[in-house]
Image (tube, rainbow, N blue to C red):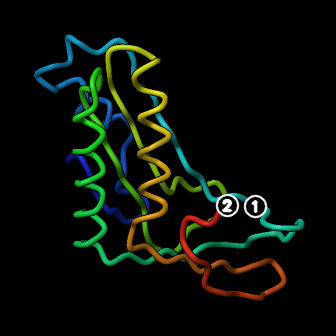
Amino acid sequence: MTRVGIHEKGDLSIQELIEYIKANERFGEVGGVACFLGFVKGMIGEGKKVKDLELEAYKERAEEIFSQIAEDIRSRPGIVECLIHHVTGKLKLGDLIFVVMVAGRSRRDVFPALVEAVERAKREATIWKKETLESGESYWVEYGTE
C-alpha cells in the first residue's frame, strides 16, 4: 500500500491503510487517526434514486494531486500521516469509493486536517463521475459537487 492511490473496485483495503499508518516511523507520536469513508449513496438531489456510478480518473495526475495534498497536510503541526485513496470503475449502492485517513497527536490536530484533505481532494482531483438513475437516465456530474 502507498500513501495515495487510484484503485479498481475491490483493490482497496482499509486494514492495509491502517497497517501503513502503524508502520510509519513516527507512529509513536500518534494519539488518534481520523478517517473519512465515502460510499455510493442511493439518493441524490430531490429524491432521485441512484442505480450505479461510473468513476473515471486521469490516474497519474490524480495521484500527483493527492500526493501534494497529503504532503501539505503532513507538514501541519501535530500531523504524522495523511493517506488519500479513491476507487474507480462501475460501482453500486454501498460500494466504498473514497478513503482519507489523517494520523496525528490529538483529535484537535487530525479533525481539521481531515476536513481540509477531503475537501481539497474532492475539489482538485482529476476524477469524473457518471450517475445512472433507477429511471435509466444517466449523466456526467462535476466531481466534488456533493
Q: Quadrant of the C terminus?
A: bottom right
- For label 2, the crowd category at 10 Å Cα-Cα, with few meaning under 14, some 14 to 19 and many 20 or more, is some
Report the disc number at residue 144.
Answer: none
Residue drawn 43% across the image and 73% down it = 127
Residue 68 is situated, as x and y percent measured from the top left of the image, at 24, 54
Q: Please name whichever residue, 71 or 46, is drawn nearer the observer in this view of the structure.
A: 71
Residue 29 is situated, as x and y percent measured from the top left of the image, at 23, 12
Please, what is the three-letter code of the amino acid marked with disc 2? Answer: Leu
Judging by the rendered image, the residue that carries numbered circle 1 is: 42
Choose top left, top right, bottom left or bottom right for residue 81.
top left
Choose top left, top right, bottom left or bottom right for residue 13.
top left
- For label 1, the crowd category at 10 Å Cα-Cα, with few meaning under 14, some 14 to 19 and many 20 or more, is some
Report the disc number at residue 93.
Answer: 2
Please, what is the three-letter code of the amino acid marked with disc 1? Answer: Gly
Q: Please name whichever residue, 15 or 47, is drawn nearer the observer in this view of the structure.
A: 47
95 left or right of 100 in image: right
**Number of on-image labels:** 2
Residue 6 is situated, as x and y percent measured from the top left of the image, at 32, 63
Contact check, label 2 and label 1, Cβ < 8 Å = yes
Residue 19 is situated, as x and y percent measured from the top left of the image, at 26, 29
